[in-house]
Image: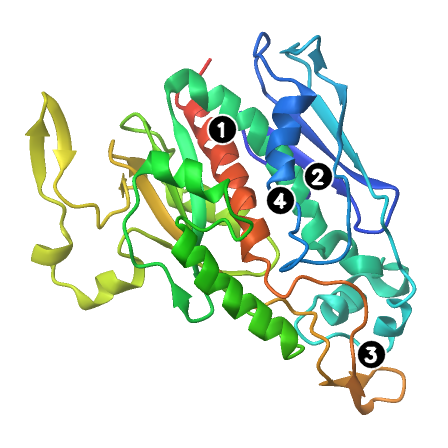
């Protein structure tokens, strides 16, 4: 299915090398101040940097087809179209015969047959994440009515890891100032070195995006099955290259005792808080009023220029493959705003379902 959400619904359509990609956001109330500029500001954060990104240059210009008039939402479904302009499909036909390691080529061909659109990865391309960013821009505007804010940053790329803690306001300011979307200039420089070293070797590198949401009211979530973690994980795993998601202490919790992992309650300024946040702001699938915190693991970009082993599907024998085309040596920097958008959309949906948003 290409639709996600309940009270807020996001439908995506299009392919990487077709005329364009489009999303429909249904459930946004009337009267919100949202312009094409609001959406474009977020989309611009996803564009690749010349030095560390792909050479494919798309404007990613958002065209609002419906649902917004004179800078205000009408209550009708919001349709956003993004044209594909810088397309080169010449190098993709060979992958019908020799599938790329790490890509969806082989299982997609087995599922859809020869009619499957392999160009640029088709519907499995990271290009589709621009639509999540566009929907996220709308969701962020909705969440602002609750004073809920979302920010993400590159926490690790390869062996370059940012172990420092950062204030929320610092995250917003710093990640907009460097193309790696790191939380500090020093971390950005170390991560840039990792990316350039991988590119020089004809290889790629993965990393971790950390996301934080603050201002959430207590009780957001719809257990038993539509928990905050469950709903977020569903959309996050739809992002190409995501291979892991952990909330709060995550897998470290398996090595802790209850006395270490439990977050003690306290009263601060007349408000119930926890002294630690190993739960990542979620208990029983519901928000507990603390910052929502989670990490998203991204695998290295599957397309690399180094020679790889594959198979010839027509002759059913082993062969070698070199992938041409234009690819990011690391997708983490561009994925930061995608994680933000995905998170904002799910939180807006859950807040609306729970009666926190009109």
Residue located beneath label 1 in the image = 349
Residue 228, picture quadrant:
top left
Whether residue 356 can be seen here: no
* 63 to 159, vertically: above or below: above
Q: Nearer the viewer, mark 4 or mark 1?
A: 4
Q: Residue at x 46, y 56 (%)?
A: 188
**Upstream in the sequence, badge 3 or badge 1?**
3
Q: Residue at x 59, y 69 (%)?
A: 196
- Distance between the alpha carbons at the discs numbered 2 and 1: 16 Å
- Image quadrant in which the N terminus is located: top right
- Distance between the alpha carbons at the discs numbered 3 and 1: 41 Å
Q: Look at the numbered disc 4 and give the secondary structure of its residue.
A: loop
**Upstream in the sequence, badge 3 or badge 2?**
2
Residue located beneath label 4 in the image = 46
Q: State the image coordinates of residue 265 (x, y, percent, origin top left).
A: 9, 37
Task: State the colouring used for the structure image.
Answer: rainbow
């Amino acid at each position: 299915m290409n639709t996600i959400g309940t009270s807020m619904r996001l439908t995506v359509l299009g392919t990487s090398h077709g005329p364009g990609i489009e999303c429909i956001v249904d459930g946004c109330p009337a009267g919100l101040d949202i312009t094409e500029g609001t959406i474009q500001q977020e989309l611009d954060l996803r564009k690749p940097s010349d030095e560390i990104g792909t050479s494919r240059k798309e404007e990613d210009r958002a065209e609002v087809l419906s649902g917004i008039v004179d800078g205000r939402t009408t209550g009708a479904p919001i349709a956003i179209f993004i044209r594909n302009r810088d397309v080169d499909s010449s190098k993709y036909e060979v992958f019908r015969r020799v599938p790329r390691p790490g890509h969806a080529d082989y299982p997609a061909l087995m599922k859809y047959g020869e009619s499957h659109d392999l160009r640029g990865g088709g519907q499995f391309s990271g290009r589709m994440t621009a639509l999540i960013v566009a929907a996220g821009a709308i969701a962020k505007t909705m969440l602002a009515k609750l004073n809920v804010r979302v920010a993400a940053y590159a926490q690790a790329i390869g062996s370059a890891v940012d172990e420092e803690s950062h204030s929320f306001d610092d995250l917003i300011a710093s990640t907009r100032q460097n193309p790696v979307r790191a939380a500090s200039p020093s971390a950005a420089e170390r991560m840039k070195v990792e990316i350039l070293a991988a590119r020089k070797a004809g290889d790629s590198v993965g990393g971790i995006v950390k996301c934080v949401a603050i201002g959430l009211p207590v009780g957001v979530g719809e257990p038993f099955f539509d928990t905050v973690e469950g709903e977020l994980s569903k959309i996050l795993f739809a992002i190409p290259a995501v291979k892991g998601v952990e909330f709060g202490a995550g897998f470290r919790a398996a090595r802790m005792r209850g006395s270490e992992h439990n977050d003690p309650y306290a009263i601060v300024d007349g408000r119930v808080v926890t002294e630690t946040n190993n739960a990542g702001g979620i208990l029983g699938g519901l928000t507990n009023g603390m910052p929502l915190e989670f990490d998203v693991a991204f695998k290295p970009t599957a397309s690399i220029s180094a020679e790889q082993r594959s198979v010839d599907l027509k002759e059913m024998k082993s062969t070698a493959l070199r992938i041409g085309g234009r690819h990011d040596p690391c997708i983490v920097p561009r994925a930061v705003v995608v994680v933000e958008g995905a998170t904002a959309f799910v939180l807006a949906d859950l807040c609306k379902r729970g009666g926190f948003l009109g």
